[in-house]
Image (cartoon, rainbow, N blue to C red):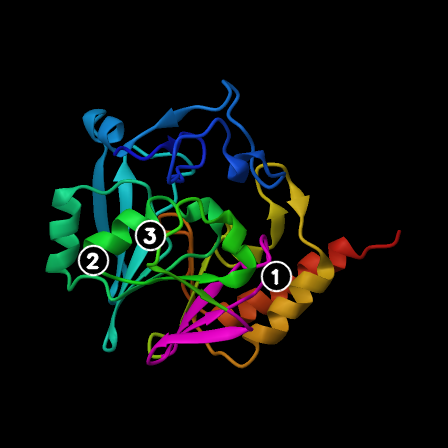
Amino acid sequence: MEFPICVTCGVQYGAPRADCPICEDERQYVGWEGQRWTSLAELRAAGHRARIEEEGLDVVGIGTEPSIAIGQRALLLRTPAGNVLWDMITHIDNDLVREVHDLGGIDAIAISHPHYYGTMIEWAHAFDAPVYIHEADCRWVARPDDAVVFWAGDTREIADGVTLINAGVHFDGGQVLHWRDARALFSGDILQVVNDRDWVSFMYSYPNFIPERPRTVRRALRLLEPYDFDRVYGAWWRKIVYADGKNAVRRSADRYLEYALDDE
């Protein structure tokens, strides 16, 4: 069975349907030509292929050329406790699976928020790996499967020194990943690395320019405070804060809150 994939967000659904709830939500949008669907077979036939490049020490970027949907890239973290795939793309084929196996395979998958769910079940099955999603976002899982592990609370360690943090920005279940030994935070666009690359931002909706609530940003800062990190890896190629990441997040939040709470 060819499972349908939304052209606009790139998320694969478990059965044919007329709508994409993820795109109809106010944080996303339905494509200007209306709701359109594709499949992995159609994407492969159109010539989409994997792009695999190093993004840091023991951090391998996995993306797609030409770009699909939102265009984010995933990151393979090659940790001593096993490989973790952070975030997700839509494309997957036999060549890509072989290349990832050559890099050590995948022991666990974690995804920042629903816009990046992509073909997460295809990846979970290909590598026999669990997918960690915060329970606050369970209703957005478009293809339910036993591979999905819903977790609760503020933090969840999924490997030694690899911890998910429910920042709650962008989505209630929006999560970031901290890798202790690499002194790195993997943020997707829960904390969006901006073009300056010395700053991040916090948005409820990026395409519709809806700012995140100040109380949510403050909560995220409190949860991040115990963790040290130098780098912050965003959602797109080279969208990385390369140094002083923790201070970059702190001063970015201060700037954001200053403008958000301006009473003039």
Foreground pick, 84 / 126: 126
- Can residue 55 be seen here? The reply is yes
Residue at the limit of the structure toward the right, as seen here: 264
Could you classify mark 3 by the number of other residues whose Cα lies within 10 Å: few (under 14), some (14-19), or many (20 or more)? many
Which residue, given by chain and number where applicable, does mark 1 sit on?
Answer: 252
Instruction: Say what amino acid the circle numbered 2 marks.
Output: Phe
Look at the numbered disc 3 and give the secondary structure of its residue: strand
| Residue drawn at point x = 53 percent, y = 21 percent | 32
Instruction: Using the rendered image of the protein, determine whether residue 254 is visible from the camera's viewpoint.
Output: no
- As helix, strand or loop, the secondary structure at mark 1 comes to helix
Q: Nearer the viewer, mark 1 or mark 2?
A: 2
Q: In the image, 70: left or right of 209?
A: left
Q: Quadrant of residue 29?
A: top right
In the rendered structure, the answer to whether residue 107 lies left or right of residue 13 reads left
Q: Nearer the viewer, mark 1 or mark 3?
A: 3
Residues drawn in magenta = 152-180
Give the Cα distance between marks 1 and 2.
37 Å
Q: CA distance from mark 1 to mark 3?
A: 24 Å
Residue 249 picture location, percent across and down: 56, 65
**Observer-nearest of 224 and 263:** 224
**Where does residue 153 sit, x and y in percent of width and height?**
55, 73
Q: Quadrant of residue 154?
A: bottom right
Residue at image x 23%, y 77%? 80
* Residue for point 35% across, 34% down: 68
Dot 1 or dot 2: first in sequence order is 2
Task: Give the labeled residue for mark 2.
Answer: 127
Residue carrying label 3: 74
Q: Residue at x 67, y 62 (%)?
A: 216
